[in-house]
Amino acid sequence: MPQLITQMPVGRNGVPAAAPNREKALKILSKSIYKELRQNGYEPKMIVALATELISLVTSDIKDDSQLV
């Protein structure tokens, strides 16, 4: 499974490049995933189910983290 890049990109002469615009990157990634799912036969209802499951997992993760504090 591909992993998100977590390090700042390096530009010329080893100098760190400008920080990526994560909000824009997330929009592009979302559109790309949606387009790929649709092209592979997933109906909008199925994509909503996927999104719901992702939200559930993130919510559980946040809840678990808050209980550690």
Image: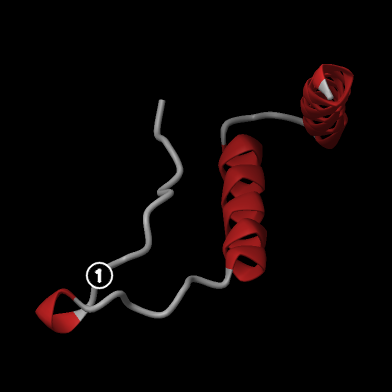
Disc 1 target residue: 10
Colour pattern: secondary structure
Mark 1 surroundings: few (<14), some (14-19) or many (≥20) residues within 10 A:
few
In the image: residue 66, left or right of residue 42: right
* Quadrant (top left, top right, bottom left, bottom right) of the N terminus: top left
Between residue 25 and residue 18, name the one nearer to us.
18
In this view, 21 is above or below 53? below
Q: What residue is at 25 percent from the left and 70 percent from the top? A: 10
Q: How many marks?
A: 1
In the image: residue 36, left or right of residue 23: left
Quarter holding residue 53: top right
Quarter holding residue 13: bottom left
Q: What residue is at 33 percent from the left and 78 percent from the top? A: 17
In the image: residue 63, left or right of residue 17: right
* Quadrant (top left, top right, bottom left, bottom right) of the C terminus: top right
The local secondary structure at tag 1 comes to loop
Q: Which residue, as the protein is rendered here, is positioned at the far front?
A: 69
Q: Which residue, as the protein is rendered here, is positioned at the far left?
A: 13
In this view, 38 is above or below 32? above
Q: Position of residue 19 (x, y in %)?
A: 47, 73
Q: Position of residue 42 (x, y in %)?
A: 70, 29
Quarter holding residue 14: bottom left
Q: Position of residue 31 (x, y in %)?
A: 65, 55
Q: Position of residue 20 (x, y in %)?
A: 49, 71
Between residue 36 and residue 12, name the one nearer to us.
12
Q: Amino acid at mark 1?
A: Val
In the image: residue 21, left or right of residue 51: left
In this view, 31 is above or below 58? below
